[in-house]
Image (tube, rainbow, N blue to C red):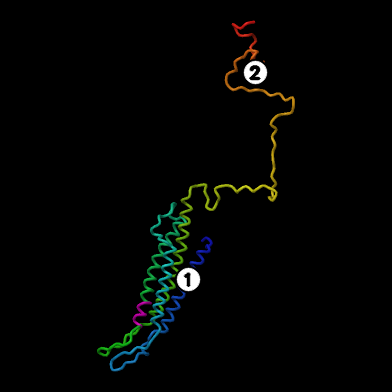
Amino acid sequence: MERLSRSQKWICGIVLTLGIISAVLGFVAESKRIKSTEIHVVEGECKYPTSSALILGVVAALVLLIAQIIINVVGGCICCTPGPPGPPNAPSASNRSIAVICLVACWITFLNAFALLMAGASLNNQRQEYMWFGSECNVVKPLVFAGGALLALATVVLGLIFYLASSAAKAAANAARLPPGIALGQPAYGPYPQPYGPNSAQPMQYTTYPLYGPPGTQYTIHSVGPPLPPLPEYVHQNYPHVVTGYPKQDHPPQGSSQ
C-alpha cells in the first residue's frame, strides 16, 4: 500500500479517535447500568435508581454516528464509480472489491451497534413499573452496552479499511485512464529561463554578426526566376542606382539615331 498523505492521516486519526470514544462510553455505560439488585420493590411496584447509563449510551451512539458519516463522506460512493479498466485481478480491481465488502460490513456493524446502544439507553431510563402476577422487574440485560461498544470498534476499523481501499482504487483507476506519455505531476513545459543581468549568476552575452565584409569583398547577385532583360547603355549611365543587376545591350535598339 502506498504511503498515506497528510490528509489521510488526519482523517484516519479523527475517525479512530471517535470510535475509541464511542467504545469507551459503551463500556462505561455497561458498568453503570441498573442491576436487578439495585431495584426496590414496594407493594408490587418496581422503583429504579438514577443511572448515568442513559446519557453514556446516547452519547456513544451519536459519536459513532458522526464517525460513520465522516467515513462515508470521505470514502465516496464506490458502488457508483465505474470499474477501472484492465483485468479483474489488477490491483485497482482488488482494492475496489475490498472497499465494497468493507462498506457493506461496516454498515451492518454500525446498525447493530447503534441499535444496541440506543436500546440499552432507553431501557435503562425506566423510573417505576408495576409488577403483574408476580413477574420480575425489567432491567437491561448484561453485555448489551458492551456488545454495542465492540461493534462500534469493528465499525470504525472496517470503515477505515473501506476508505483506504477506495482511495487506492480511485487513484489507480485515474492513472490508468490517462493517455500514454503523460505523467501526473510533471510540468508540460520546460523550466523558465534564468534572468540575465548584473545581479544574475549567468552574465548576459552578446553575439555580433557583421553586416558587410571587409573592403574588397566581392558580392554575387543571385536572381530568382527568369533572367533580367538587357537595358540600353544610356540607362546604365544615367540611372546606375536603379538598374543594378540588369545587363547592358551590346548594340543600340533599332530605330535610334547614331
* Closest to the observer, 212 or 234: 234
Q: Is residue 74 left or right of residue 249?
A: left
Magenta span main SS: helix
249 lies above or below 103: above
- The magenta span reads 117-124
**Residues packed near mark 1 inside 10 Å, few (<14), some (14 to 19) or many (20 plus):** some
Which quarter of the rendered picture does the C terminus lie within?
A: top right
Please tell me whether mark 1 sits on a helix, a strand or a loop: helix
Judged from this view, the residue extending furthest toward the right is 215
Q: Is residue 182 magenta?
A: no
Residue at 48 percent of width and 47 percent of height: 179
**Residue placed under numbered mark 2 in the picture:** 239
Disc 2 to disc 1, how far (Cα)? Answer: 98 Å
Amino acid under label 1?
Answer: Leu
Amino acid under label 2?
Answer: Tyr
Q: Nearer the viewer, mark 2 or mark 1?
A: 2
178 lies above or below 111: above
Residue at 27 percent of width and 89 percent of height: 131
Q: Is residue 253 left or right of residue 50?
A: right
21 lies above or below 220: below
In the rendered image, residue 19, in percent from the top left (x then y), is placed at: 45, 73
* Closest to the observer, 97 or 3: 3
In the rendered image, residue 17, in percent from the top left (x then y), is placed at: 48, 72
Residue 16 numbered mark, or none: 1
Q: Are marks 2 and 1 in contact (CB under 8 Å)?
A: no
**Residues packed near mark 2 inside 10 Å, few (<14), some (14 to 19) or many (20 plus):** few
Question: Which badge, 2 or 1, is on the more N-terminal residue?
Answer: 1
